[in-house]
C-alpha cells in the first residue's frame, strides 16, 4: 500500500494552503485555505478538485484565512467529519470565518450596486463565496487537540500537534501513516514563527521525518539582511516623527497576532515614556474578539508575557487604548484633531475598515501608513509598499502623499536561516522536503539553498501536483 500527497494550494504562491493525503483506506485534508492573491482568487469559486463527502478528517494548522478560509465552502459542499485543531485555533477560526462571511455578503451587495451603476460586470459572481450561515455551520465540526496529543483516523493515519510559534494556537502537524505495518512520518510545518517573539512560545523542533512539507514565505531572504531588528526603536521613531508633523499613524494589521503584538510593543513604549500618550484606536471588531481569546488562553503565553501580566502591565488594557466597536465610532475617528494611532484590518488592505482610514489619510503628507505584516503580490498593500503613486480604494483612485513605512521585524514567519535551523535537528535526512507556501522565487530559492546546505532532496510542487510517499 502506498500513500499519495496532492498539493491543492499554496503551491508556488503564499495563500490557499490545502493538501490532500490519501491511502487506500483514508483521505485526510491538511488545511483548507482561501486564496487572497489576485490572479489566484478564481480558484476560490471553482468546485473543489476532490469530493468533500469522501474526506475522513481535516487537520488544521492555524486560523489565518489562507489556511482555514474555505472551510465554510467545504462543509456546505458535503464535508461531514471533524476539523481537528487546538482549542485556541478553533475559537479564533470561528471569529475569522464569521467576519469573512460578513465581508463576502457585504462585498457582493456593494459589487452588484457598483456594477449596475457603472454598467459592467466584474470578474467574480455578484454572490458571496459563502454566507454567515455557511460559516456558522463549521463550528460543530471543530475538535480540540492539545499540543503533544495525537488523533487517530481509522488506525491508519495519526495526526500529532506541536507548537509552531506563529500565532496563538498555531501548530505544526506530524502525521504518522501505517502502510502495511510500516510507518511513514510526514511533517506539515504550517507557518513557522521566529524564536523569541513576544507573547507566545517558540516553535517545537523535530528529530525525524520521512517527508516534510515546509513553508517558504521568507525562503529567499534573511530578516537581518533587510531590517533593523529593534522593532521598538523603529516604531518609536516612526510615531514621534509623525506626531511632530501633526499626522496620524495608520496601521493595516492582521486581526490575529499582529494586532496583539503591536499593542504589546506600544504598551512597552508608553511605559518607558518613549512616545507621547496619544490615543491608540483598535478599530477592528475581529481583532477585539480575538484579543479576548488571548485573555482566555494565558496558558499559551511565554514566560516574559506571563511576568508582565503578574506585574499588572497587560498590553491589552492600557489607559489610552480605545476599543472601537461600531461603524459610527469608527467614522468618528476621522474627526479627531490630535495625532492618533489607528490599527484596523485588513492587513493587506483587501477589505475592512482600513480602506476608509486610508482614504482619509493617504492624501495627507503629514500622515504615515505603517505596514507591520507581509504583503502578498497584487494586493493593495503590496502596491503601496512598492511605491505606487496612486491606489484604487472603494471604487475611486487616490494619490499617495502620505509616508509609507514597513517594519519587518514584526514578521510571524521565520526567514531562510530560521527554516534551515528548524530542520537542522533531523537525525536522518528526510526522503524529500516539499517546499510550499512561498512566492515561486522564494520557494525555489529556498529549495536550492536547502539542497546545497544539506544534500537533501527537495521539490517545489505545482498546483495539483501529486507525490507518491513510498
Image (tube, helix red, strand yellow):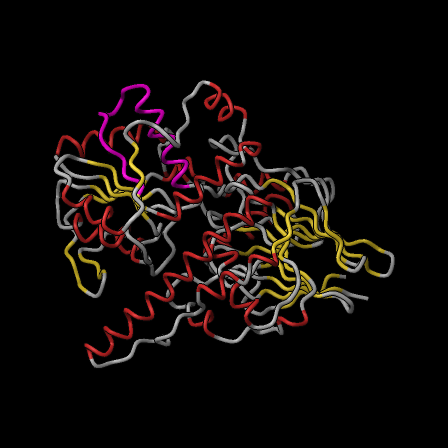
Position of 235 relative to 38 (above/below): above
Give the quarter of the image for residue 303.
top right
Quadrant of the rendering where the N terminus is positioned: bottom right
The furthest residue to the bottom: 119
Tell whether 143 sits left or right of 380: right
* Residue 421 visible: yes
281 within the magenta span: yes
In the rendering, at what x and y percent does residue 470 appear?
Answer: 77, 61
In the rendering, at what x and y percent does residue 140 appear?
Answer: 60, 58
Instruction: Tell me the magenta residue range.
Output: 258-282
> What residue is drawn where x is 31% and y is 46%?
325
Give the quarter of the image for residue 206.
top right
Tell whether 261 sits left or right of 191: left
> What residue is drawn where x is 18% and y is 64%?
396
Residue 109 or 340: which is nearer the viewer? 109
> What residue is drawn where x is 41% and y is 59%?
100
Residue 198 or 220: which is nearer the viewer? 198
**What is the tally of numbered marks visible in this picture?**
0
154 within the magenta span: no
Residue 194 or 74: which is nearer the viewer? 74
* Residue 10 visible: no
In the rendering, at what x and y percent does residue 6 appear?
Answer: 63, 66
In the rendering, at what x and y percent does residue 438 appear?
Answer: 48, 55
Tell whether 16 sits left or right of 158: left
Position of 150 relative to 115 (above/below): above
> What residue is drawn where x is 46% and y is 22%?
308
Position of 412 relative to 356 (above/below): above
Amino acid at each position: 500500500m502506498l500513500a499519495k500527497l496532492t498539493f491543492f494550494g499554496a503551491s508556488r504562491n503564499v495563500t490557499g494552503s490545502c493538501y490532500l493525503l490519501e491511502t487506500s483506506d483514508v483521505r485526510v485534508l491538511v488545511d483548507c485555505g482561501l486564496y487572497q492573491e489576485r490572479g489566484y482568487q478564481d480558484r476560490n469559486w471553482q468546485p473543489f478538485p476532490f469530493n468533500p463527502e469522501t474526506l475522513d478528517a481535516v487537520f488544521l494548522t492555524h486560523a489565518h484565512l489562507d489556511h482555514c478560509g474555505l472551510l465554510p465552502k467545504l462543509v456546505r459542499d458535503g464535508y461531514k467529519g471533524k476539523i481537528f485543531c487546538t482549542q485556541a485555533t478553533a475559537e479564533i477560526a470561528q471569529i475569522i470565518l464569521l467576519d469573512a462571511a460578513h465581508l463576502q455578503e457585504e462585498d457582493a451587495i456593494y459589487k452588484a450596486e457598483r456594477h449596475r451603476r457603472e454598467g459592467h460586470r466584474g470578474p467574480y459572481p455578484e454572490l458571496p463565496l459563502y454566507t454567515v450561515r455557511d460559516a456558522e455551520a463549521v463550528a460543530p465540526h471543530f475538535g480540540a487537540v492539545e499540543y503533544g496529543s495525537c488523533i487517530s483516523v481509522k488506525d491508519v493515519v495519526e495526526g500529532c500537534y506541536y507548537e509552531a510559534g506563529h500565532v496563538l494556537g498555531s501548530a505544526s502537524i506530524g502525521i504518522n501513516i501505517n502502510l502495511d505495518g510500516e510507518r511513514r512520518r510526514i511533517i506539515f510545518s504550517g507557518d513557522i514563527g521566529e524564536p523569541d517573539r513576544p507573547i507566545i512560545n517558540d516553535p517545537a523542533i523535530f528529530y525525524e521525518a520521512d517527508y516534510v512539507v515546509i513553508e517558504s514565505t521568507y525562503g529567499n531572504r534573511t530578516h537581518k539582511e533587510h531590517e533593523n531588528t529593534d522593532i521598538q526603536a523603529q516604531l518609536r521613531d516612526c510615531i514621534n516623527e509623525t506626531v511632530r508633523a501633526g499626522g496620524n499613524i495608520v496601521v493595516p494589521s492582521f486581526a490575529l497576532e499582529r494586532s496583539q503584538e503591536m499593542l504589546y510593543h506600544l504598551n512597552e513604549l508608553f511605559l518607558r515614556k518613549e512616545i507621547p500618550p496619544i490615543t491608540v484606536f483598535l478599530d477592528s471588531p475581529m481583532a477585539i474578539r480575538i484579543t479576548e481569546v488571548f485573555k482566555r488562553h494565558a496558558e499559551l503565553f511565554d514566560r516574559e508575557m506571563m511576568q508582565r501580566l503578574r506585574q499588572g502591565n497587560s498590553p491589552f488594557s492600557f489607559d489610552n487604548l480605545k476599543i472601537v466597536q461600531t461603524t459610527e465610532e469608527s467614522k468618528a475617528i476621522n474627526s479627531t484633531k490630535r495625532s492618533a494611532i489607528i490599527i484596523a484590518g485588513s492587513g493587506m488592505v483587501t477589505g475592512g475598515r482600513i480602506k476608509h482610514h486610508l482614504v482619509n489619510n493617504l492624501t495627507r503628507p503629514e500622515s504615515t501608513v505603517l505596514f507591520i505584516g507581509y504583503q502578498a503580490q497584487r494586493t493593495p498593500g503590496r502596491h503601496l509598499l512598492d511605491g505606487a503613486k496612486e491606489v484604487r480604494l472603494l471604487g475611486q483612485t487616490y494619490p499617495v502623499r502620505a509616508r509609507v513605512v514597513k517594519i519587518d521585524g514584526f514578521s510571524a514567519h521565520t526567514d531562510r536561516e530560521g527554516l534551515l535551523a528548524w530542520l537542522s535537528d533531523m537525525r536522518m535526512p528526510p526522503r524529500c522536503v516539499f517546499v510550499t507556501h512561498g512566492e515561486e522565487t522564494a520557494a525555489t530559492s529556498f529549495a536550492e539553498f536547502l539542497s546545497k546546505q544539506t544534500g537533501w532532496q527537495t521539490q517545489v510542487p505545482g498546483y495539483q501536483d501529486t507525490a507518491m510517499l513510498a
